[in-house]
Image (cartoon, rainbow, N blue to C red):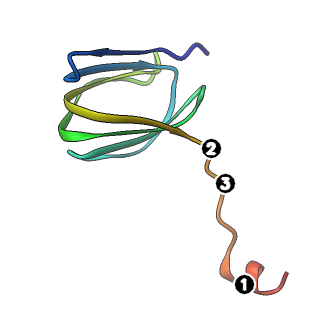
């Protein structure tokens, strides 16, 4: 799956290649793309378009940062960590 981002005037962001959306609020969007984990930070963020069939999302608002990170690993249970 191809991953692209388009940012216009720091106020309109279009992202393709979306695999999962972890959270979305007016200050932060956390999602997984085909290129890795992504966090979008800003102010007054609003989801303009979400189409999971096409794997795209658009975000409106003031975009302050677009951050890629390593993939999330499933957390082990407390008991499993204690008895390693």
The C terminus appears in which quarter of the rendering? bottom right
* Residue 55 location (% of width, % of height): 47, 21
Closer to us: mark 1 or mark 2? Answer: 2
The image's mark for residue 73 is 3
Answer with left or right where residue 25 lies relative to residue 68. left
Closest to the observer, 65 or 51: 65
Q: Quadrant of the N terminus?
A: top right
Q: Report the side of 54 relative to 27 (left or right).
A: right
Residue at x 61% of width, y 50% of height: 72
Query: Reading the chain from its start, which is encountered first: label 1 or label 2?
Result: 2
Above or below, 69 relative to 81: above
Distance between the Cα atoms at labels 3 and 2? 9 Å
Q: Which residue is mark 2?
A: 70
Q: Secondary structure at mark 3?
A: loop
Residue 25 screen position, x and y as percent: 25, 47
Q: Which residue is mark 1?
A: 79
In front here: 31 or 50?
Answer: 31
Q: Nearer the viewer, mark 3 or mark 2?
A: 2
Query: Which of the 4 quarters of the picture holds residue 41?
Result: top left
Who is closer to the viewer here, 23 or 61? 61
Asked whether the residues under the numbered discs 3 and 2 touch, taking CB atoms below 8 Å apart as contact, a structural biologist would say no
Residue plotted at (60% across, 26% down): 34
Measured in 3D between alpha carbons, the distance from the residue under mark 1 to the one under mark 2, in whole angstroms, is 25 Å
């Amino acid at each position: 799956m191809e991953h692209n981002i388009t940012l216009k005037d720091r106020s309109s962001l279009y992202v393709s290649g979306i695999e999962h959306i972890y959270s979305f609020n007016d200050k932060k969007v956390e999602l997984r793309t085909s290129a890795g984990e992504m966090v979008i930070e800003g102010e007054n963020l609003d989801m303009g378009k979400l189409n999971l069939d096409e794997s795209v999302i658009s975000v409106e608002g003031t975009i302050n940062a677009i951050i890629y990170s390593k993939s999330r690993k499933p957390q082990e249970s407390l008991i499993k960590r204690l008895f390693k």
